[in-house]
Image (cartoon, grey):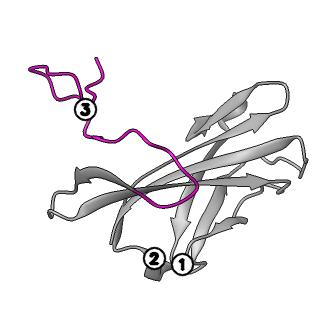
Amino acid sequence: MLKTKTQSTAYNLVTDKDMTYSYAETNTGSTWVDGKPIYRRVFKVTNKALSNGAVVQSFARSSFSEITRIYAYLCGSDGGHIPFTRVGSGGKGSSIEYSSANNGFIFIGSDTWGAQSSRWLMIIAEYTK
């Protein structure tokens, strides 16, 4: 059961107080273990080839103190969704990671996808400042 701002329950399974998702930085209303507020930002990356080590989205290290969660998925115009971290056929796998050396999110894995305007990558990052 998800806990929202208006529900009261003995179980606190979700730490998000504000389930708002935006391309702009949003304060979630939650705090990290160090007491700092957690912020969320959504990145939509279009027409980008994905191969091992490719930087898919810039996000300056100076923009945050600590990343608390990254999740991502690939969407197609056919309505299909591929979540990352992903384990595919033959043991192939893929993920989206943050690289301080590259100042952004990178694609890691043995899968590859060519750039297509009908396909996009959604990255949701939660972090403290």
At label 3, counting other C-alpha atoms closer than 10 Å, the crowd grade (few under 14, some 14-19, many 20 or more) is: few
Tell me the quarter of the picture where residue 26 sits.
Answer: bottom left
Cα gap from disc 3 to disc 2, whole angstroms: 28 Å
- Extreme-left residue of the structure: 10
Q: Which residue is mark 2?
A: 63
Circle 3 or circle 1, nearest the eye: 3
Q: Which residue is mark 3?
A: 5
Tell me the quarter of the picture where residue 126 sits.
Answer: bottom left
The secondary structure type at the circle numbered 1 is loop
- Marking on residue 86: none
Name the chief secondary structure element in magenta.
loop
Instruction: Confirm whether the magenta stretch covers residue 100.
Output: no
Which residue corresponds to the image point at 83% horizontal and 47% vertical from the top-left? Answer: 113
Circle 3 or circle 2, nearest the eye: 3
Which residue corresponds to the image point at 17% horizontal and 29% vertical from the top-left? Answer: 12
Q: Amino acid at mark 3?
A: Lys
Which residue corresponds to the image point at 82% horizontal and 57% vertical from the top-left? Answer: 48
Residue 35 appears in the rendering: yes
Q: Which residue is mark 1?
A: 60
Which residue corresponds to the image point at 55% horizontal and 41% vertical from the top-left? Answer: 85
The secondary structure type at the circle numbered 2 is helix
User: Which region of the structure is painted magenta?
Assistant: 1-26
